[in-house]
Amino acid sequence: MRKMKLEEKKYENENIFLKKLDKEDIQHSNYMFKLYPNPASTQLTISYLLNSAEKGKLILYDILGREQMQVDLQNNINKVSVNIRNLPQGIYMYKFFVKNNQTENGKLLIE
């Protein structure tokens, strides 16, 4: 019985994090955000379109909700490639922010 409670506790943070990714809470935008390839292995490409006064950011989280990578996105560049070789294989969640407001989210598989 005690072992089962420990297992439930282990996944409690994961469940809280996943519930926060509910797409209904996200205001989808016209930023033409794309993250590819998915699945990825060594490099990740982020394409987006920001207005001249906007700055964006992509945050990558592991499945337990721990931040693994943050990429600042400038308005004068529409595509960025990111080296992900140092990230372990697994399922990741990402969030795309513009002016500190989350506009997109999703899952990424690194293999």
Image (cartoon, rainbow, N blue to C red):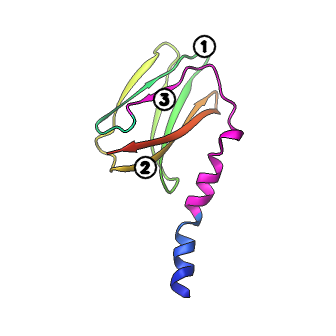
* Quarter of the rendering containing residue 44: top left
Residue 30 shown left or right of residue 66 in the figure: right
Q: Does residue 39 sit above or below 81 in this rendering? A: below
* Location of the N terminus (image quadrant): bottom right
The reply to whether dot 2 and dot 3 touch (C-beta < 8 Å) is no
Residue on which disc 1 sits? 51
In the rendered image, residue 16 lying in the magenta stretch gets the answer: yes
Image x and y of residue 19, in percent: 64, 52
For marks 3 and 1, give the CA distance.
15 Å
For marks 2 and 3, give the CA distance.
21 Å
For marks 2 and 1, give the CA distance.
31 Å
Q: Which mark is residue 91?
A: 2
Q: Amino acid at mark 3?
A: Asp
**Residue bounds of the magenta highlight:** 13-37
The nearer-to-camera label among 2 and 3 is 2
Q: Amino acid at mark 1?
A: Asn
